[in-house]
Image: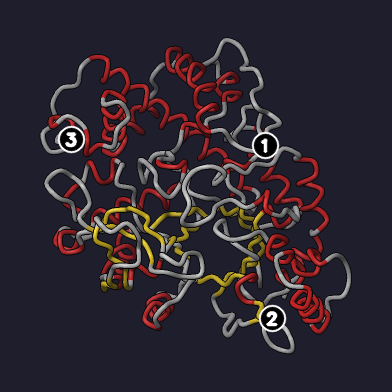
Amino acid sequence: MRETGILMPVSALPSRTGVGELGAYAYEFVDALKENGVKIWQILPLNPVGYGNSPYQPYSSCAGDELYISLDLLYEGGLLKEKAPSFRENAKTVDYDAVRAFKEPYLKEAFANFQETEEYREFTSQTWVYEYAVFRALKKANGNACWNEWKAEDKAWPEVPAPLAKEQEDEAAYQMFLQYEFFTQWMAVKKHANENGIQIMGDVPFYVGVDSVDVWGGKDNFLLDTDGRPIFIAGVPPDYFSATGQRWGNPIYNWDYMKEHGYQFWTDRIGYNQKLFDIIRIDHFRAFDTFWKIPAECPTAIEGEWIEAPGYEVIDTLKAKIDGLNLVAEDLGELRPEVLELKDHYHLKGMKILVFSIETGGKYAYDSFHDVENMIIYTGTHDNDTLMQWYEGLSVAAKRKVRRFLKRQGIKQGSVKDRLLTYTFRSRAEYAIIPMADILGLGEEGHINTPGTVGSPNWEWRITDFTQAKKELKHYRKTMTERA
């Protein structure tokens, strides 16, 4: 039985404050999914965004971004004296810096009015919470520079923890409060979704950002020089997206050290995320098999080599130590057979992308799906063109072939968008997941990220007309709930 899901970043939800948050619209979105038979809400990482506002370069693998904290809920909880005014409510993009500047005084006010509870003390007793809070406090004290540019004693704090100055201790306390509020609000949204029969699919990047508490607090887990700078960095060689490859800049793991320590880094990281989500999609899953190792001094990703990773050992450890682990593998791109063998060994669902799989080069268009077992079909992901952007970019002849292909499948009614979505919903894949931008039929304006580029307009798309969004979901209710 096929289930339907919607890919919708939390950041893209409507709100009164210029960025999606964990307040009323998150609950309204869940309700809209339930009303239209949707069973999965897939999101992007919720961690504090770092370089370029990318959720795949976060400051922490466990922490949540305070950007998503609902000010209205803080007001309703008595932590704000007055309701915050609207800010960039109708803006079509997220201005991360402006929204942070707007929200910060209200978050500070809420912190000043907060009284510790037993639940708060239990939450902050987790090792990662205080370490992350100190990281953020010291980062602020060092002009927000990357940790490997900090003062020597601050760089070495995880190994030689020294008492913090009062200003930094106060900042750390503020950061712990933010994490508690984020966690409380997020888990309430998740509870609402689960109670309405909807699972949350979270997204965990394979790598972590160099400017993160993960690296600062666990330097031995990575291949770094004595100054804390990566010796090798992650990426992929030249591919569909880039002729020079993708040079991500993430540090490479020290797999020998991790093995000696029972892969505890991975157990802690995935184990905590399993509390936050029902399903975890591992981005760049192929690196559990082989990863592209680029010398840090190389300006592109052309130079590098494939190195084997201990994927079986890591996943065996995760499955043994984490109850109810439910992983999905992002297995896109040029892969060697061993990647798929690894995925299939653990019976993990993989991904197929419609816009990459409809071939139009021959006399007739056809899809290149060779296997639907344990598969999730997407029209697209956050990294590629929207469905209509892809279609409008085809030649006149290729468009005609696509329409004829759909007609041969017995799909003759509605717009091209309707027919392409119907084809996706009718797939025999176990899950059919559609980006919200494709439900809305958006073109370039709904494109979330262009791999190989940094900064605006990546990650900035958001919905402002929620009425139209709910109307479009309702329009596809019947085809979304038909069983393949």
Residue 250 to residue 4: above or below: above
Q: Nearer the viewer, residue 206 or 144?
A: 144
For the C terminus, which image quadrant?
A: bottom right
Which residue is the site of mark 2? 360
Residue 220 in the figure: left or right of residue 92: left
Q: Nearer the viewer, residue 62 or 231?
A: 231
Residue 147 to residue 166: above or below: below
Which residue is the site of mark 1? 14
Does the CB distance between marks 3 and 2 fall below 8 Å? no
Task: Determine the secondary structure under disc 3.
Answer: helix
Look at label 2 and name its amino acid. Thr
- The percent coordinates of residue 6 (x first, y second) are 65, 56
Residue 155: assigned label: 3
Q: Residue drawn 22% across and 52% down?
A: 230
Of labels 3 and 2, earlier in sequence is 3
Of labels 1 and 3, earlier in sequence is 1
Q: CA distance from mark 1 to mark 3?
A: 39 Å
- The percent coordinates of residue 86 (x first, y second) are 66, 21
Look at label 3 and name its amino acid. Lys
Residue 77 in the figure: left or right of residue 413: left
Q: Residue drawn 52% across and 30% down?
A: 69
